[in-house]
Amino acid sequence: MEKGITFEFYDQIREVLGLPETDVDSYSPLVLAYMGDCVYDLIIKSMVVSRGNKQVHRLHEETSSYVQASAQSRMMRAMQPHLTEEEHAIYRRGRNTRSVSAAKNQTITDYRRATGFEALVGYLFLKKRYARLMQLVKIGLDSLEEKE
């Protein structure tokens, strides 16, 4: 069997733009959540677009159902039993951080749990633990499908 080539997306971004190596462990939970929000959005948009060509408005509606705080909160509850101690610590730091913005149409519990979720996603992405990131996101997405 032929070995596959691993494409390190974040390495490509850093190399092309000449960005320095950084200590991911020094980032605040809100910085990790900021990055995680973007990464998770890309994952979901990739999934939604792969389901077929649709009007952008329809794509947005489908994407919104996955990226809202209540959905991320439900995903996080399903993922928690599968987290390592390190991952759980990152999640807790994100969840317990007070953010500047308030929850919009979401409970504060869902909003905080979603912030922890996004912090964990950002952390795993920046640590280049792509397989683990996708494993956990898949667990979360599967839990959303079960509830429908």
Image (cartoon, rainbow, N blue to C red):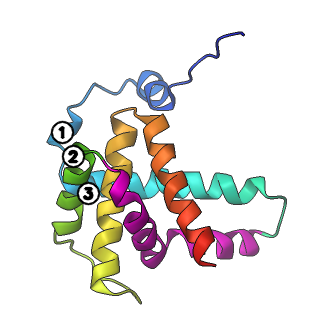
Relative to 4, say whether 35 is above or below.
Answer: below
The quadrant in which residue 77 appears is: bottom left
Q: Give the CA distance from mark 1 to mark 2.
A: 15 Å
Residue drawn where x is 24% and y is 53% of the image: 88
- Residue under label 3, please give it: 91
| In the image, residue 123 lies in the stretch drawn in magenta | no
Work out whether mark 1 precedes mark 2 in sequence or the reverse, and give the earlier one: 1
Location of residue 36 in the rendering, given as x and y in whole percent from the top left corner: 39, 53
- Judge depth for marks 3 and 1 and give the one in front: 3
Q: Give the CA distance from mark 2 to mark 3.
A: 10 Å
Q: Is residue 72 left or right of residue 126?
A: right
Residue drawn where x is 56% and y is 24% of the image: 7
- Residue under label 2, please give it: 85
Work out whether mark 3 precedes mark 1 in sequence or the reverse, and give the earlier one: 1
Q: How many marks?
A: 3
Range of residues picked out in magenta: 56-83
- Residue under label 1, please give it: 25
